[in-house]
Image (cartoon, rainbow, N blue to C red):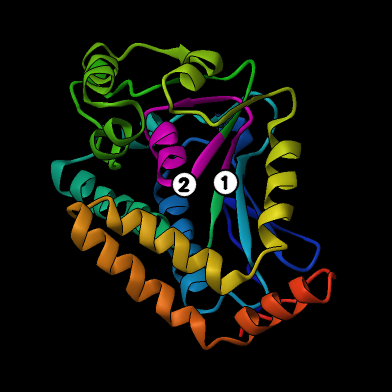
Amino acid sequence: MSTMNYQTLAIEPQGEHILLVRLNRPQVLNALNTQMGKDQHDLWTRLTAEPGNTRCVVLTGAGDRAFCAGADLKERDGMTETVWRAQHEIFERAFMALMELPLPIIAAVNGHAFGGGLEMALCCDFIYAARTARMALSETRLGLMPGGAGTQNLPRAAGERRAKELIMTAQAFDAQQGYEWGIVNRVCDDALADALGTAEKISENAPLAVRQAKKSAHYGLQMDLATGYRFEIEAYNQLVGTEDRKEGVRAFNEKRKPRFQGK
């Protein structure tokens, strides 16, 4: 994949197969502005179409204070309704592109994640959070409601009743609470280091198999069990004829580490 340069994102390859993406507006706690929405939509769309050698993505925030403080309210101050809706359309496309990214993506929540920042993390496959991180879907305090799939992803992670409580109260919670409620996978002393370590483990596995498994889990949850299982088998059967499947079986029988090529 060709070199990518963005105004609001820092792209840092980590070895051959891992891509580290930093939300890069630390002076405003990595707040989501219009340009960041455009940059993210472009990045997730390009990675979907042309992943190249990338097998796993880690998303984090620049600096040590925040993952993302939510939407940039200074930019939004005085916006007309028409401009606001147009901006949100950009955000919606970015969130959808993130959720539909075939590659596994881990959110390394290195600091606070509020509003759209938490929604962004929830759009990832799972979340590692720093012990000091605080999170909230705080939109109802601003006369709004979550608009980045927060009312969809939070109930799927924490259950309907807990999600309703957090959304309606706009209550902030810490990383340990997020872990206990099923929102956070791991509470970390160094969320980025732990996320990169897990990304390395994922990247050692067969990339086509990982992507098919992700797709099956993600879309299968939107179906009844029997239909979801049929979807799983369709995804499974796509792997039977791959070179990676043959290599995996050969490596097992030869008692060596497999060399997967994504073919």
Return the disc, 2 or 1, that comes first in the chain's sequence: 1
- 257 above or below 49? above
For mark 1, give the secondary structure: strand
- Find disc 2 in the rendering and name its residue: 124
Residue 54 sits above or below residue 165 on the image: below
Res 246 → quadrant: bottom right
Picture quarter containing residue 61?
A: top right
Q: Residue at x 35, y 71 (%)?
A: 233
Is residue 241 shown in magenta? no
Q: Nearer the viewer, residue 100 or 13?
A: 100
Q: Are there few (<14), some (14-19), or many (20+) residues within 10 Å of tag 1? A: many
Which residue is identified by label 1? Answer: 106
Q: CA distance from mark 2 to mark 1?
A: 6 Å
Is residue 74 at all visible to an observer of this figure? yes
Q: Please determine whether, in this image, residue 23 is positioned above or below residue 35.
A: above
Residue 230 location in percent, x, y? Answer: 26, 68
Amino acid at dot 2: Cys
Q: Residues within 10 Å of mark 2 (few under 14, many from 20)?
A: many
The amino acid at mark 1 is Ile
Label 2–label 1 contact, CB within 8 A: yes
Q: Between residue 197 and residue 65, name the one nearer to us.
A: 197
Residue 118 sits inside the magenta stretch: yes
Left or right of residue 22, residue 14 in this image: right
Q: Which residues are magenta?
A: 107-127
